[in-house]
Structures are given as structure tokens and as C-alpha cells.
Amino acid sequence: MKRRKFIKKSGLSVGGMLTFAQVKANKDLFGTEKQSIGKPVCIATWNVKDATQAAWTVLKESGSALDAVETGAKVEEADVNNQTVGKGGRPDREGNVTLDASIMDHQGNCGSVVCMQNITHAISVARKVMEDTPHVMLAGKGAEQFAIEQGFEAENLLTPKSAEEYQKWLKTSNYEPVINIENHDTIGILALDAQGNLAGGCTTSGMAYKMAGRVGDSPIIGAGLFVDQKVGAATATGMGEEVVKTVGSFLVVELMRQGHSPDKACQIAVERIVENNPEYQKIQIGYIALDKYGNSGAYCIHPGFNYRRFDTKGHELITPRSHL
Ligand code: ASP
């Protein structure tokens, strides 16, 4: 059979791309009908049950996806035992805790704060940037000043535990992020509310012992987070530099737009990083994605990454496939 004829017959197109007819008929790559599997839904990177539950509670009570992701992220930001986010986060190599966060709604509005100090709820400041300024990003002192003007309390985010670990780290000053060990781990939350609106948020203290002024993927729209109401949403965790280089979350959403399932879209985006980086075995990257129908998926380089999903059937901790 001639190649073109075969393609026509099988209904599949070259290189995993969907035919126009498949996209129009709302079918995935295997010809299966995409269906709404029930709203509302929320998912979050890592096993942050309390945070995901808090987001779910908002959704269950007919709250908005935007309120849900902010509420969920705030739980982790306030938890001093989570040393990768908010208060209690591990500091940079000068001993300063600096936070990155971003938020995006179903209308494509977004806001973020970059390298902000002394304010626990970076996600809420990001939302204020989105809603109350003509800008998308505020950085450093400007972000902190804006937060204080908005009524946020300034506090010392360096807890005794993180300070003690930092003092130990100073003895070697060796910057080598350990895979799946908590010296990184952004909390990213994606939600689809009962009205069918999507939103996403992510918050982090970034890589522990990073250089002063270092910014990761999390506050960069398209890298650490992206939401497109027509398609779905994605967020990332892991070595932010690699996510920035491939505009990872945007890539995942665009792959879903082409008809890939959330799982497959995350896989292709992770493999893009693997292909580009001969040292990929030394890093972890995890993506999670949620499409507008409520289907979710994820993929990572190393096993050990998981995500929590809440929907009308209950909740589960999902271990995605991994490259290694
Ligand atoms: N992506 C974050 C950053 O690079 C850290 C992480 O999620 O592990 O800042």
C-alpha cells in the first residue's frame, strides 16, 4: 500500500500529528472520543494532600478555579515543614529566602512575583499583580514593596531548621541539587471548576542554595505554568533552567492542542529536555497537565515524582511514567 493511502486508511497522520478531521471530531491520536470526565477537578505536583484538598474544597463549593489554586498553594506556603515553598523555604547561598510564584486564569490573565523576600504568600501577591496592576511580573524589592502596600505582612521566612541546614551547607558550598530530595520541589496546582473554567498557580522558594538573584521557571509564564482555556493547563517542577529553555508548560499545552493526551504531551515535553541535555540523568523534571475535559496526566525523568488528583470520585496519588 502506498504510504499516503495507508495514512488515509488508518486515520493516523505522520509523526503522531493529528489529522484535521481528528481534531475537528474531538478525537485523540487513537481515534478515541474525548469526553468530559466530570468537573470539578484539581491536581497538584507532589504528594501535597492538604493543599490539594483545600483547593478541592473551594471547587466542591462551586468556587472558582482561580480561588482554588490560590487557596491550595497558600497551604504549602504557610507550612514551615515544607522547605521548598514559602515560609521555611531553603535560602539562596547568601542565606536569603527568595520566592517565585505565578498564577493564570481562564481568560489568559496572569501575574507573577520573582525573587521576592519576606512575604509568605507569594501566590497571593502574584494574583494581586494580575488583578490590581497593569503589569504581569514584579521582581525583588518592587514586589515586596507592592505586597506591603497591599497589606501583606513582612516576616522573616528563614526558619531555624532551614538556617541550621544552610550553616551546614556552607561548610562545603557544593551546589548539586539532589533528585527528589527536598531541596527543590515547586507546588503547582491546576484546577477546572464547575463552570468549566481552568486556572493554574505555582509557588516555590526555588533551588536551595541557588545564586543570589537566580530565577527559576515557576514565575515565568509559559515555562513553569501555562493555561489556555481552549485546551488545558500545565505546570512544572524540577530543574527550572531546563524548563525555561524549552518553554515547557507552554509546550505541553500546545501538544495537547495538537491532540495529544495530557500524559503524552508531558512525555514529549520531558523528552525534549532529555534530547537536548546529555547530562539529563543528573536532573529531575516533572510536568503535570489537565485538559479542558478534566483528563490529567504527568511524566518525569526519574521515578519518584507523583501528583495528587481530586475529583468527584475521590482522590488519589498518581505515579506517572518516567523516562528512566
Ligand atoms: N522548578 C523550581 C525552580 O527551578 C524548583 C523545583 O520545582 O524543583 O526554581
Image (cartoon, rainbow, N blue to C red):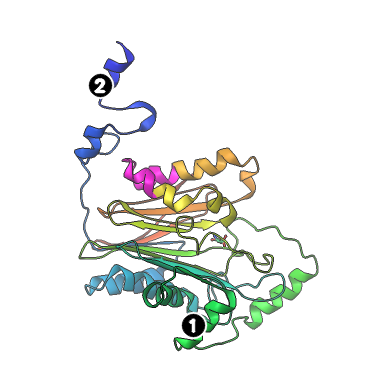
Region of the chain picked out in magenta, as a range:
253-267
> In this rendering, is residue 150 above or below 265?
below
Quarter-wise, where is residue 200 in the image? bottom left
Going by the numbered disc 2, the residue's amino acid type is Lys
Judging by the rendered image, the residue that carries numbered circle 1 is 147
- Viewed as shown, does residue 258 lie left or right of 169? left
Disc 1 residue lies near ligand 1 with CB under 8 A: no
Q: Residues within 10 Å of mark 2 (few under 14, many from 20)?
A: few
Observer-side mark, 2 or 1, equals 1
Estimate the spatial distance between the alpha carbons at disc 2 and disc 1, rounded to whole Å: 57 Å
Ligand 1 quarter of the rendering: bottom right
Judging by the rendered image, the residue that carries numbered circle 2 is 8
Give me the residue at 65% from left, 43% from top: 279
Could you tell me which quadrant the N terminus lies in?
Answer: top left
Quarter-wise, where is residue 166 in the image? bottom right
Question: Which structural element holds mark 2?
Answer: helix
**What percent of the width, then of the height, locates residue 312?**
23, 63
Q: Residues within 10 Å of mark 1 (few under 14, many from 20)?
A: many
**What percent of the width, then of the height, locates residue 271?**
51, 41
**What percent of the width, then of the height, locates residue 237?**
51, 58
Q: Is residue 246 visible?
A: yes
Direction front: furthest residue: 134
Q: Is residue 262 magenta?
A: yes
